[in-house]
Amino acid sequence: MKLSSDYFSDKPIGKGEAAVIAHARKHNGIVASNNTKDVMPYVEKYNLERITTGDILIMALKEGLITEKEGNLIWSKMLKHNRWLNADSFTNYLNK
């Protein structure tokens, strides 16, 4: 059965998302995706852990690996490349 055709939401997920989910299931891994709408039915069905860009940047900030300014730079570059993020800046994400 293919994850990209056997779906639980209103549309099938893409091949990349299906590959990530399959890999996470097989290796007890974490699904890293900002695409909540498409991947959450699978994350819930297969009891997988999911992490977003915001989660990763917050962990990096807490560990002292990046500053808030650097987080904002990463965030803005992702937005420039049409990546979906649920805030217009890292700072605004932190303040949610």
Image: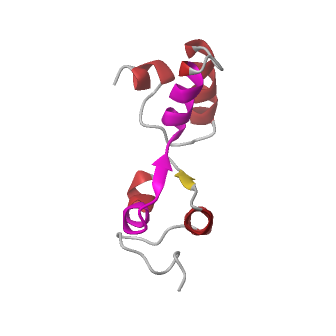
- Main SS, magenta residues: helix
Tell me, yes or no, whether the highlighted magenta stretch contains residue 56.
Answer: yes
Q: Position of residue 69 (x, y in %)?
A: 59, 13
Residue at the image point whose x is 41% and y is 71% from the top: 11
Q: How many marks?
A: 0
Tell me if residue 88 comes above or below residue 13 in the rendering.
above
Q: Quadrant of the C terminus?
A: top left
| Residue 59 location, quadrant | top right
Tell me if residue 50 comes above or below residue 1 in the rendering.
above
21 horizontally vs 45: left or right? right
63 horizontally vs 38: left or right? right
Most foreground residue, 49 or 13: 49
Q: Position of residue 33 (x, y in %)?
A: 52, 50
Most foreground residue, 23 or 5: 23
Residue at the image point whose x is 45% and y is 80% from the top: 6
Tell me if residue 68 comes above or below residue 88 in the rendering.
above
| Residue 31 location, quadrant | bottom right
Look at the image and give the residue range highlighted in magenta.
Answer: 41-61
Q: Position of residue 18 (x, y in %)?
A: 56, 68
